Amino acid sequence: MFYIQSIFCNQTQAMAEHDTDSDVAVISQVQTQVRRPSMYAVVMHNDNYTTMEFVMYVLMDIFEHNAEQAYQLMMKVHQTGRAVVATLPFEIAEMKVEEVDLLAEEENYPLLTTIEPA
């Protein structure tokens, strides 16, 4: 027990001596790197059951396209079988796809949207 106390006293003494050195300055520099998040394409796929009106509603309501943009995208989906309707960071793209899935399920449409690297 005595040995442990003497070590503790020596450490305390050394720390006290170190604290009195006021001529030592520490300079630290922090570099922050900001990277843009990886972007992902939200792709809407054509099917034979979902109405064009519903697709336009989804494009305007969930993806915030105006009526003209929504119409053009809806026609591209209809004519080519698919179209990129938004390019977003992954978490937001995933959230939008979930919103579309829930809304389509409520309306009994098999509308499919997927996420691909942009």
Image (tube, rainbow, N blue to C red):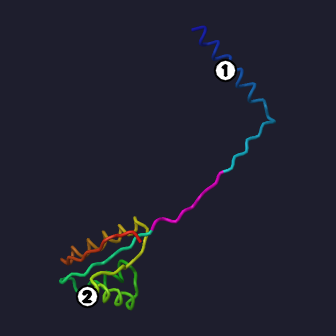
Q: Pointer 1: residues within 10 angstroms few (<14), some, or many (20+)?
A: few
Q: Residue at x 32, y 87 (%)?
A: 76
**Relative to the observer, which residue lies in front, 91 or 116?**
116
Residue 19 percent coordinates (x, y): 74, 30
Task: Report if the CB atoms under discs 1 and 2 are less than 8 Å apart.
Answer: no
Q: Earlier in the sequence, mark 1 or mark 2?
A: 1
Q: Looking at this rendering, what residue extends furthest in the right direction?
A: 23
Q: How far apart are the two marked residues, 1 and 2, measured between alpha carbons?
A: 78 Å
Which residues lie in the magenta part?
A: 30-38
- Please state which amino acid type lies under the numbered disc 2: Met
Main secondary structure found in the magenta portion: loop
Residue 11 got which mark?
1
Q: Which mark is residue 84?
A: none
Looking at the image, residue 10 sits to the left or right of residue 4; the answer is right
Residue 90 painted magenta: no
Q: How many marks?
A: 2
Q: Position of residue 93 (x, y in %)?
A: 38, 69
Would you call the spot at circle 2 few (<14 residues within 10 Å), some (14-19), or many (20 or more)?
some
Residue 97 relative to residue 32: left or right? left
Kindly state the secondary structure of the residue where label 2 is placed.
helix
Q: Which residue sits at x=70%, y=25%?
A: 15
Residue at the spot 18% in from the left edge and 84% down from the top edge? 48
SS class, disc 1? helix
Looking at the rendered image, the quarter that the N terminus falls into is top right
Which three-letter amino acid code belongs to the residue tagged 1?
Gln
Residue 87, relative to residue 38: is it above or below? below
Question: Is 70 left or right of 24, judged from the image as shown?
Answer: left
**Image height of 20 relative to 59, above or below:** above
Picture quadrant of residue 6: top right
Residue 92, quarter of picture? bottom left
Q: Is residue 115 above or below residue 24?
A: below
Disc 2 target residue: 52
